[in-house]
Amino acid sequence: MFCSLVSGSSGNASIIKNKNTIILIDCGLSGKKLATMLDGIGINPHNINAMLISHEHSDHITGAGVVSRRYNIPIYATAGTHKNLNIGPISEENIRIINKCVSFEIGDITVNSFPISHDAADPVGYSFICGSKKYSIATDMGIMTEEVFSAIKGSDSVILEANHDVDMLMHGEYPYQLKRRILGDFGHLSNDSTAKTAVRLLENNTKHIMLSHLSDKNNDPLIAYKTVESELIRHGAKIGSDIGLCVAGRYEVSEFI
């Protein structure tokens, strides 16, 4: 199982489960909300083996401290991210420092982290190997670097950021400095950038892409979907047979990959 629990500027969290191993990726929702959502998909939070944190922004860590303490879950993150987490006290045994681009095992899942271009202390995305399958999550990036693409290419399924429509952002209500930040190399991926990445992923045998981290002010699920769909079709792909495409829900569990 690989799915998004919540996605967007209001909060982000995903789950990957393989055999007896369950990993929570980010925890940008309350402990109560997490427990309710997990119950809806048949997962007991006491059975979560690990929590991976991509970076320290609040929409990724809101409930991380509470959830770690309540269920005794170790938190894996880079040293820079751990140093900047504002989540209250965490027991020493549950502070796990990871090194970027170094694979490690959590139960029967192999995890690899890779650096992303974002305005945080030491942010990363993650790829997972579950038997013969590879899954990746790559969000909160100003640009799709070759290092990131190299890390996620060959994935069977990818949760990929499609944060904003450039026209909506430029003509929207955000102040100029915030628009510059979002459009910059350490901001967020636009629908157009994501569409180009989707084509490259298709060419490297990805079978499913879930668009995620959509802005509620500067994007729309249908616009994001159609932008990526059109680019894939333009390159000869048949949606549904050559590649699956969907959009992660802002407040609800996505379809399972």
Image (spheres, rainbow, N blue to C red):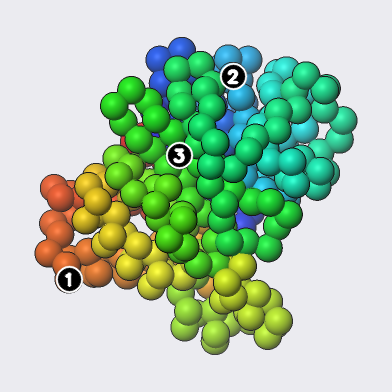
Vertical order, 175 against 15 (above or below): below
Q: Nearer the viewer, residue 58 or 106?
A: 106
Q: Is residue 58 above or below residue 168?
A: above
Tell me the amino acid under the disc marked 1. Arg
Instruction: Give the labeled residue for mark 2.
Output: 49
- For residue 6, which numbered disc appears in the image? none
Determine the CA span between mark 2 and mark 3. 17 Å
Check the image and report above or below for 240 versus 66: below
In what element is the residue under mark 2? Answer: loop
Residue indicated by mark 1: 234
Q: Secondary structure at mark 3?
A: strand
- The residue that appears at 33% across and 42% down in the rendered structure is 155
Q: Report x, y in % for residue 133.
A: 31, 31
- Residue drawn at 50 percent across, 60 percent down: 214
Mark 2 touches mark 3? (CB < 8 Å)? no
Q: Quadrant of residue 228?
A: bottom left
Q: Which is more toward the observer, 178 or 197?
A: 197
Residue 127 or 215: which is nearer the viewer? 127
